[in-house]
Image (cartoon, grey):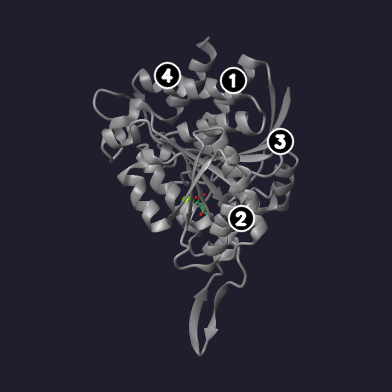
Amino acid sequence: MRYKIALLAGDGIGPAVLDEGIKVLNAIEQKFGYCFEYEKALIGGCAYDDCGKPLPDSTVKIAKDSDAVYLGAVGDWKYDALPPEVRPEKALLGIRKELNLFANLRPSIVFDELLESSTLKPGIIKNVDIMIVRELTGDVYFGQPRGIDYINGERAGFNNMIYFEKEIERIAHVAFQTAMKRNKRLCSVDKANVLDASRLWREVVTSVSNSYPEVELTHMYVDNAAMQLIRNPRQFDVLLTGNIFGDILSDEASMISGSLGMLPSASLSNNEKGLYEPIHGSAPDLKGKNVVNPIATILSAAMMMRYSFGKDIAASTIENAVKSVLRQGYRTPDICFGKAIQVGTTQMGDLIAKEILTAD
Ligand code: IPM
Ligand code: MG
């Protein structure tokens, strides 16, 4: 089994966490006899420094020619003053659009071992297992017109929250199919009491639900969803959101699990191709300190096995290795408390890779 994986390490701590992910992939290769062929490409600030573009055409080509893209993180404060078109974040939006990665899966799972690391009470978060299905290539992120211009003699900034019926339909299908493989409960998030884009969203999601009679569909306004996520997160199975609401709610959901450093993501198209990245950012202040948690990136490799390569056993081998290392008490500083054994980024990667190779 040969797979081509594009490695887009990016900026800040991106390269450091991706290195640990690669260690884990190497262990998987060895254990299951797969062959991963890697090709590196620049994205974000480092690409801008190299050629004046955060998303060079050559990077898009490498990504398109691969079976999966494995990404670290992009961005650094030193690029804050750049015009929006060449900011590192633009590369992330660009590659999502170029590869048509419209479905973003962001699981929020609470590991028993980390019950104490969350800012929420253990009794509230125990057994939380939520899958956020976030639309990723539409909404106010990409809507036209947009800009900063003079309107009636005064400067105004504007973006267009717009959703096309087909865009809502295809992400709704992903969400219902995801729910079918889980507990068959889907909560669609919108702001239909105020926004027209949301009124259409609710109508289309409701009509798609006719094809999935077994799934229990509910609707929730986004402000209420933000509150319910910390009030009683166990009520949710699958959450379906548009691009901006999902951006906000997924950061919130990540804190249920204790650390932004724990949560992976998959961005999928309607073929097997996908982009896998931690949901955290580039944390430039932590670069070079060997303190960041590589688990989000490592768990993203598990999602790659499952969603792009159809290798469920390899995926659960990675997930079980993570759990096992946590159970043995090893923690990076972001999740370290009590009697835990504090380790750095590279040690955490080594421990998980070793666990993969030694587990039966
Ligand atoms: C995310 C990030 C990105 C987004 C940024 C960096 C463009 O916050 O993946 O959640 O807003 O989608
Ligand atoms: Mg975000």
Give the residue at the far bottom of this rendering: 153
Where is residue 150? Give x, y as percent: 53, 84
Looking at the image, tell me whether mark 3 or mark 1 is earlier in sequence order.
3
Q: Residues within 10 Å of mark 3 (few under 14, many from 20)?
A: many
The answer to whether residue 285 of the structure is visible from this angle is no
Q: CA distance from mark 2 to mark 3?
A: 26 Å
Residue with the mark numbered 3: 67
Q: The N terminus lies in which quarter of the figure?
A: top right
Q: Secondary structure at mark 4?
A: helix
Q: CA distance from mark 3 to mark 1?
A: 19 Å
Q: Residues within 10 Å of mark 4 (few under 14, many from 20)?
A: some
Looking at the image, tell me whether mark 1 or mark 4 is earlier in sequence order.
1
Looking at the image, tell me whether mark 3 or mark 4 is earlier in sequence order.
3
Q: Secondary structure at mark 1?
A: helix
Of marks 1 and 2, the one in the foreground: 2
Q: CA distance from mark 4 to mark 2?
A: 39 Å
Of marks 3 and 1, the one in the foreground: 1
| Residue 5 in the figure: left or right of residue 318 | right
Q: Are marks 2 and 3 in contact (CB under 8 Å)?
A: no
Q: Amino acid at mark 1?
A: Ile
Residue with the mark numbered 1: 313
Q: Is mark 4 within 8 Å of ligand 1?
A: no
Residue with the mark numbered 4: 324
Q: Secondary structure at mark 3?
A: loop
Q: Amino acid at mark 3?
A: Asp
Where is residue 10? Give x, y as percent: 56, 45
Where is residue 49? Give x, y as percent: 60, 54
Q: Residues within 10 Å of mark 1 (few under 14, many from 20)?
A: few
Q: Are marks 3 and 4 in contact (CB under 8 Å)?
A: no
| Residue 128 in the figure: left or right of residue 360 | left
Q: Amino acid at mark 2?
A: Ile
Q: CA distance from mark 1 to mark 2?
A: 32 Å
